[in-house]
Amino acid sequence: NAGVTQTPKFQVLKTGQSMTLQCAQDMNHEYMSWYRQDPGMGLRLIHYSVGAGITDQGEVPNGYNVSRSTTEDFPLRLLSAAPSQTSVYFCASSYRERGSSYNEQFFGPGTRLTVL
Amino acid sequence: RKEVEQDPGPFNVPEGATVAFNCTYSNSASQSFFWYRQDCRKEPKLLMSVYSSGNEDGRFTAQLNRASQYISLLIRDSKLSDSATYLCVVTRFSGGYNKLIFGAGTRLAVHP
């Protein structure tokens, strides 16, 4: 199993450009999520999905869109990049969380994004 | 106030030392607790869950104090390979699902 894969590893954008960060997992996990990690701050949840066709907002969703057309893929779209979106982006997946139980989240290697 | 607070460190310790990290959380409804490890420029990986009774995994011991909303991680006999950032993580239940809330991490550097 490849686990969780992310592309690209690095990206530089100009303000106003749009792009899509790709995330895929081959573990048949229902739950997938996107986080951003900034210096001095913990990972913050951007969007998440509990299954194909179902997405919801996390803590910091503004400026990002997601879709989940298949179980395997969960792309993150930056609509109009801003310098404040310079960050490291991690995608994660897990078995679907049910009620108060928790299943370990597996993270991809991250995408380092710089917006000039 | 951050929902999960950690001392950022860095903790610089010699090989063989015992080191302890602390973490406090503000949401008393949090139900699950974890320590994740993150190596430099890598993704976080689950180190261990934290249970109310305390739990141990080799050289690592985790403790939870729900009354004080306090979590700890003790590393005994530190190895060079323990150098990493340790993330304290709690869950917050919202929208029908548990979300992970991360602390900013405590950096550990073990030197020869």
Image (cartoon, coloured by chain):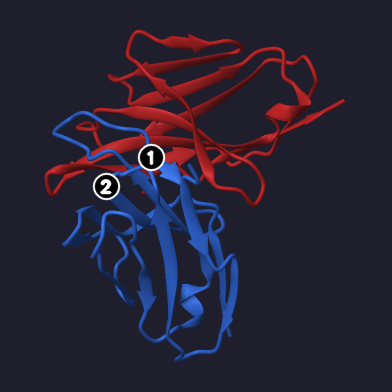
Chain colours: A blue, B red
Judge from the rendering whether residue B96 lies leftward or rightward of residue A49; answer left or right.
left
- Above or below — where is B59 with respect to B85? above
Judge from the rendering whether residue B19 lies leftward or rightward of residue A56; answer left or right.
right
Classify mark 1: residues with Cα within 10 Å, few (<14), some (14-19) or many (20+).
many
- Which chain does the residue under circle 2 lie in? A
Secondary structure under the numbered disc 1 in the rendered image: loop
Circles 1 and 2: CB distance less than 8 Å? yes
Residue A68 sits in quarter: bottom left
Residue A94 visible in the displayed image: yes
Please tell me how many numbered marks the rendered image carries. 2
Residue type at mark 2: give it: Tyr
Secondary structure under the numbered disc 2 in the rendered image: strand
List the residue tagged with mark 2.
Answer: A31
Residue B58 in the image: x percent, y percent? 58, 10
* Residue occupying image coordinates x 80% and y 20%: B15
List the residue tagged with mark 1.
Answer: A105
**Camera-side residue: A73 or B73?**
A73
Residue type at mark 1: give it: Gln
The answer to which of marks 1 and 2 sits earlier in the sequence is 2
Judge from the rendering whether residue B83 lies leftward or rightward of residue B96; answer left or right.
right
